[in-house]
Image (tube, rainbow, N blue to C red):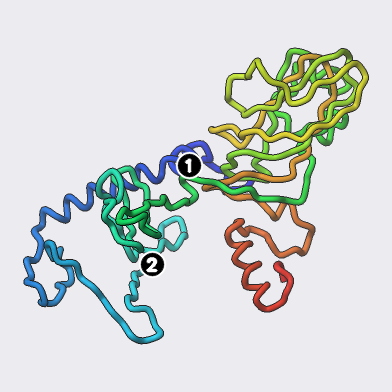
C-alpha cells in the first residue's frame, strides 16, 4: 500500500461529501462578504475592485471582438506545508436557490444551495431546460484496465490479498462453506466505487453458490454470483460495489470451494486507478491518474504518437 492510501477512510468520507460541504462553506462565505456592504455604483460606472458591486436589476455584459477570451481570470498558487501547490480559485459561483430559474436564457450557469452546478443549453418554447453538470462528486466512470488476478485460493502466493484467511480456508486453501473472505484492493485502486470481474469456482465439495458483494455491507440472501454442482469448474462475469470505507470486496461460499477472481475494470468517481501496478514495465504511466492518462492520450493522438510515449 503506498502513501496515497494513508488515512483513506477519513479522506473517503470527506471526498464523497465534498460537494455538499463546499456548498455550505461557500454559502457562508458569501453571507459574510455581503454584510460588508456593496458598492452602490450607478449603471455605467466602473466595477470597483476589492468590493462587492451591486448592479441591481441591470446585468453586466462584457463583449469582445478579438480571437482571445473576452474575460481572463487568474489567481495565485499557494504552496502548502504538505508540499502540494494549491491553486487559488479563479471563479466562484454563489449557491443560490433550489434550481435555476425556468426563465434563464441558454448558456446560463449557476450553483444551487445543494451544491449542484446547473446550466441551460436550450429552451423548450420559452421555458429553460435545466441540466446538471456531472463531476467526480456526483457521477463516476468505467475504467478498463489490463486484467489482473485479485485472488486465487489454489495458491498461497495468490491468497495474500485475503485479509481474514485464518479460520475461513481449509488446508488446501478452499473457501469453507458458510464463510466469507475479504479481498483487499488498494494496491490497484484508490477510492473505487465498483469493479467488473470474472469469478471462477473449481473443486467444490458439494452443490452451492458463491456471492461477491461490497465489503462492510450486510451479505444479501437473495442472489448468487455463480451456482455450481459438486466438482464443477465454472466461470461467470460480475459487477459489484466496493466497500464504502475501504477498497475491499467480500466473497461468500455456501459450500467449500476454490475461488478465483480476475478484475477487468474499475468504476471510479473521486478515486483513481494505480496504472503503475497494472501496466508493463516502461509503459510510462507511473503515478498518473486516469484523467491525466486520458489527457496525455488526447495530445498524443493529435500528433500521431502512442499514448504513453
* Residue 209 x %, y %: 78, 19
The residue to which callout 2 is attached is: 77
Residue 152 placement: quadrant: top right
Residue that lies at the very extreme toward the right in this rendered image = 231
Query: Residue 159 vs residue 14: left or right?
Result: right
> In which quadrant is the C terminus drawn?
bottom right
Residue 11 - label:
1
- Between residues 114 and 98, which one lies in front from this camera angle? 98
Q: Is mark 2 on a helix, strand or loop?
A: strand
Query: Residue 21 vs residue 238: left or right?
Result: left
* Disc 2 packing (10 Å; few <14; some 14–19; many ≥20): few
Work out whether 14 lies above or below 41. above
* Disc 1 packing (10 Å; few <14; some 14–19; many ≥20): some
Q: Can residue 121 be seen in this view?
A: yes
The mark that comes first in sequence, 1 or 2, is 1
Work out whether 291 lies above or below 198. below
Residue 229 placement: quadrant: top right
Q: What element carries label 1?
A: helix
Q: Can residue 24 be seen in this view?
A: no
* Residue 252 x %, y %: 72, 20
* Residue 52 x %, y %: 15, 63
Q: Residue at x 25, y 46 (%)?
A: 97
Query: Residue 191 vs residue 32: left or right?
Result: right
Q: How far apart are marks 1 and 2 (CA)?
A: 23 Å
Q: How many marks?
A: 2
Q: Which residue is drawn at 28% across and 47% down?
A: 25
Residue 234 - label:
none
Residue 230 placement: quadrant: top right
Residue that lies at the very extreme toward the front in this rendered image = 125
Query: Residue 248 vs residue 128: left or right?
Result: right
* Residue 73 x %, y %: 33, 72
- Between residues 194 and 117, which one lies in front from this camera angle? 117
Amino acid at each position: 500500500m503506498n502513501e496515497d492510501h494513508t488515512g483513506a477512510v477519513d479522506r473517503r468520507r470527506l471526498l464523497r461529501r465534498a460537494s455538499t460541504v463546499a456548498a455550505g462553506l461557500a454559502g457562508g462565505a458569501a453571507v459574510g462578504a455581503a454584510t460588508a456592504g456593496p458598492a452602490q455604483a450607478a449603471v455605467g460606472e466602473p466595477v470597483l475592485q476589492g468590493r462587492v458591486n451591486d448592479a441591481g436589476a441591470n446585468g453586466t455584459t462584457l463583449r469582445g471582438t478579438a480571437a482571445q477570451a473576452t474575460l481572463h481570470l487568474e489567481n495565485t498558487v499557494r504552496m502548502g506545508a504538505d508540499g502540494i501547490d494549491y491553486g487559488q480559485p479563479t471563479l466562484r459561483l454563489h449557491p443560490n436557490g433550489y434550481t435555476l430559474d425556468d426563465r434563464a436564457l441558454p448558456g446560463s450557469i449557476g450553483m444551487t444551495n445543494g451544491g449542484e452546478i446547473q446550466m441551460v443549453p436550450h429552451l423548450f418554447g420559452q421555458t429553460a431546460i435545466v441540466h446538471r453538470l456531472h463531476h467526480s462528486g456526483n457521477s463516476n466512470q468505467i475504467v478498463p484496465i489490463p486484467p489482473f488476478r485479485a485472488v486465487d485460493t489454489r495458491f498461497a502466493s495468490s491468497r495474500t490479498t485475503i485479509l481474514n484467511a485464518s479460520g475461513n480456508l481449509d488446508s488446501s486453501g478452499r473457501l469453507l462453506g458458510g464463510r466469507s473472505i475479504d479481498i483487499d484492493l488498494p494496491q490497484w485502486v484508490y477510492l473505487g466505487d465498483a469493479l467488473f470481474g470474472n469469478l471462477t469456482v473449481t473443486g467444490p465439495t458439494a452443490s452451492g453458490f458463491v456471492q461477491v458483494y461490497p465489503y462492510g455491507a450486510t451479505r444479501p440472501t437473495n442472489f448468487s454470483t455463480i451456482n455450481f454442482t459438486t466438482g464443477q469448474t465454472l466461470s461467470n462475469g460480475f459487477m459489484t460495489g466496493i466497500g464504502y470505507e475501504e477498497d475491499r470486496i467480500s466473497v461468500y461460499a455456501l459450500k467449500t470451494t476454490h475461488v478465483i477472481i480476475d478484475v477487468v475494470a474499475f468504476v471510479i468517481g473521486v478515486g483513481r486507478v494505480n496504472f503503475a501496478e497494472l501496466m508493463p514495465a516502461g509503459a510510462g504511466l507511473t503515478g498518473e491518474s486516469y484523467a491525466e492518462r486520458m489527457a496525455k492520450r488526447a495530445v498524443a493522438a493529435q500528433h500521431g504518437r502512442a499514448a504513453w510515449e
